[in-house]
Image: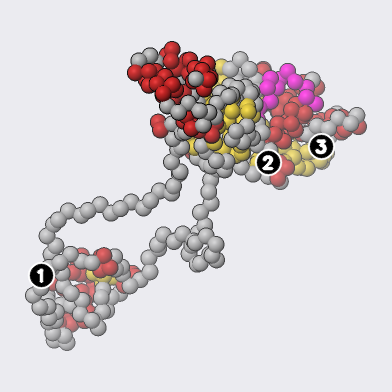
Amino acid sequence: MAASWRLGCDPRLLRYLVGFPGCRSVGLVKGALGWSVSRGANWRWFHSTQWLWGDPIKILMPSLSPTMEEGNVVKWLKKEGEVVSAGDALCEIETDKAVVTLDASDDGILAKIVVEEGSKNIRLGSLIGLIVEEGEDWKLVEIPKDLGPPPPVSKPSEPRPSPEPQISIPVKKEHIPGTLQFRLSPAARNILEKHSLDASQGTATGPRGIFTKEDALRLVQLKQTGKITESRPTPAPAATPTAPSPLQTTAGPSYPRPMIPPVSTPGQPSAVGTFTEIPASNIRRVIAKRLTESKSTVPHAYATADCDLGAVLKVRQDLVKDDIKVSVNDFIIKAAAVTLKQMPDVNVSWDGEGPKQLPFIDISVAVATDKGLLTPIIKDAAAKGIQEIADSVKALSKKARDGKLLPEEYQGGSFSISNLGMFGIDEFTAVINPPQACILAVGRFRPVLKFTEDEEGNAKLQQRQLITVTMSSDSRVVDDELATRFLKSFKANLENPIRLA
């Protein structure tokens, strides 16, 4: 009786009895009172009954960026059976842009890790883990049948050949061993059949061993002069016509043709003509998709200008003396932001139906990483000073290379800058990053000798440090005239750093 009292006082049993009246509750009471009510098997059976517990909290693969379609589970930061609180870091998820930490939204116990760390290409909304309330036996939690683990992503299997329709196959002339085989042109075939001649009696002079019309006419002349006789192949014994075997149908001509190289075998030396398949990360796939869409859907126009960096380099040297380290690229970012503020018609984007002027000036800066090109954003760049821009660029570039960028640090932006000057590139053109309308490609600064005039009008040869910038613009919103005026203003701002203060 004491054991049944303890069962009856259990709050989970009370919830069950109150919430589910009827035969089930009677059965429970009967079981609790009538069966062996010792502290042994009955309690263990009761404790293991799944419907006594609340539904587990499902951890689903979240959408952490607008372009994210799949995610990779990089690392689990909690273990099964470990207590978690709301806000605790559960695991690291690799999105299409960076590695983001997934936090717990409820208190409880991590009961089941459905998707192990290192799993790739997990679709959004897929179940990756389960959490139960504290006090429940996490070891007895089962994966819901409606949301089981996502099927592993397998390589696409080779398509099976579709069954060919049952059609009558004409009997073809069999090749007699020892005789040459020629590829006949249609005209040559007609001539040979008309005059009962065989191509093996002549010589093929066409490209890649083709027996041409001229070769067939030459045989006809030899026949008319009596130098050769008719030659019909001996008819083969009558046989039931059958479909040609795959080996016969795939037999090609005697000359080599280009073929698709076979895939190399992992762990073995690469053979001649093979290739090695390189798995693409989520970031690489998204970059490839967006670049393809940009070049195929956005009408790119290009404009190039040379800017004199003499004044910028002088100001930079003065800042270095004061132990303020800034780069030329920081001046370029500031000059672009100031120019966008002066010309808001360029600070626009295309939303699919028309131009949309943006109320903010956020500059996206391209950063090369091992996983691909990322574009962290300098927020409100026009209002920042050169040193503040330099500090932001350094911090965001490090986070980008470490894969720690937050979504709000790379999503959006109104104008992009890509600088390859540090790699020794003189000039290049860049691909627009939709929905932005422009991107500025910056090359290296280089010494150039130019003729200038002094105060008296005398020409003299002077060395200048020039940099070439090329702006790619979306012609739907920034036409050639507007792009030209923008570059003119940008050049004036960059060559006069006082305007950037």
Identified at 23% across, 67% down, the residue is 245
**Label 2 to label 1: alpha-carbon separation:** 71 Å
> Helix, strand, or loop for circle 2?
loop
In this rendering, is residue 389 above or below 25?
Answer: below
**Label 1 to label 3: alpha-carbon separation:** 97 Å
Is 101 on the left-hand or right-hand side of 16? right
Tell me which amino acid carries mark 1: Thr
> Helix, strand, or loop for circle 3?
strand
Label drawn at residue 240: 1
Instruction: Indicate yes or no whether the magenta region holds residue 462.
Output: no
Q: Which residue is mark 3?
A: 459
Query: Which color scheme is applied?
Result: secondary structure
Q: Position of residue 405 (x, y in %)?
A: 65, 31
Decide: few, some or many residues near mark 2? Use Cα within 10 Å; few <14, some 14-19, many ≥20: some
Is 107 on the left-hand or right-hand side of 389? left
Tell me which numbered mark, 2 or 1, is placed earlier along the sequence.
Answer: 1
